[in-house]
Image (cartoon, helix red, strand yellow):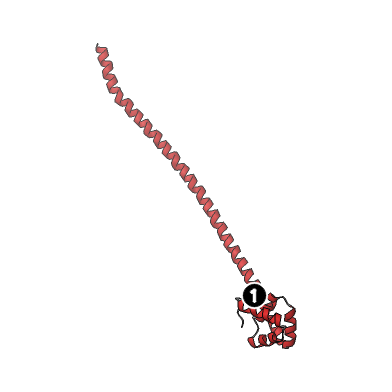
Amino acid sequence: MLILRLSSVICLLASPLFAQEDTLKLIETKRIEQQGKEETLKREEQRLNVLRKEVDEKIEAYTKLLAQVEASFKKVEQIKGEKLENVVKAYESMPPEDAAVRLSVLDNPTALLIMTRMKSKKAGAIIALMAPQKAAALTKSMTASPIKSQ
């Protein structure tokens, strides 16, 4: 009977010790899991930082490329404008009769482009010498076009 009581007392005393060991093991397991999650998050953060850097570098490269394209486009537009101004000056320097004949055979968009950049007085003299159908078509286009005359 004494042995039975001693074993009961030992069980009662040992029970909290086992519970405490289980709790410590559980805490240690959770700590290890938490460390694993933190390491995973750090690696993911590093990966994302690398990707962010790559994206920023690509954005910078594309921005530079866009600036180069825009500069080239402006240069082309400038050259195109200079060439057009030379053509306009050439037509303005012609006698109105000659300019009227030459502009009459051009397609309407090209003739319109030239006429809208000419001085109004010169353009008027040229239109007066054109065939009525061509003059009417150009006049209609001039009033409908957003292109400004000088």
Q: Residues within 10 Å of mark 1 (few under 14, many from 20)?
A: few
- Does dot 1 land on a helix, a strand or a loop? helix
Horizontal arrangement in the rendering, residue 60 relative to residue 85 (left or right): left
Where residue 144 appears, as percent x and y from the top left, is 61, 76
Image quadrant in which you'd find residue 118: bottom right
Image quadrant in which you'd find residue 85: bottom right
In the image as oriented, which residue stretches furthest toward the front?
Answer: 133
Image quadrant in which you'd find residue 124: bottom right
In the image as oriented, which residue stretches furthest toward the top?
Answer: 1
Q: Amino acid at mark 1?
A: Gln
Check the image and report above or below for 89 versus 52.
Answer: below
Task: Name the residue located 41 percent from the left edge and 39 percent from the top edge.
Answer: 34
Question: Which residue is under mark 1?
Answer: 78
Check the image and report above or below for 35 versus 115.
Answer: above
Q: Nearer the viewer, residue 33 or 59?
A: 59
Where residue 110 appears, as percent x and y from the top left, is 69, 76
Task: Name the residue located 64 percent from the left edge and 75 percent from the top edge.
Answer: 78
Task: Name the residue located 57 percent from the left edge and 62 percent from the top edge.
Answer: 63
Where residue 28 appears, as percent x and y from the top left, is 39, 34
Where residue 41 appears, as percent x and y from the top left, is 46, 44
Task: Name the residue located 75 percent from the left edge and 81 percent from the top edge.
Answer: 102
Horizontal arrangement in the rendering, residue 67 relative to residue 128 (left or right): left
Work out which quarter of the rendered image holds the C terminus and state it: bottom right
Q: Nearer the viewer, residue 84 or 48?
A: 84
Check the image and report above or below for 56 versus 20.
Answer: below
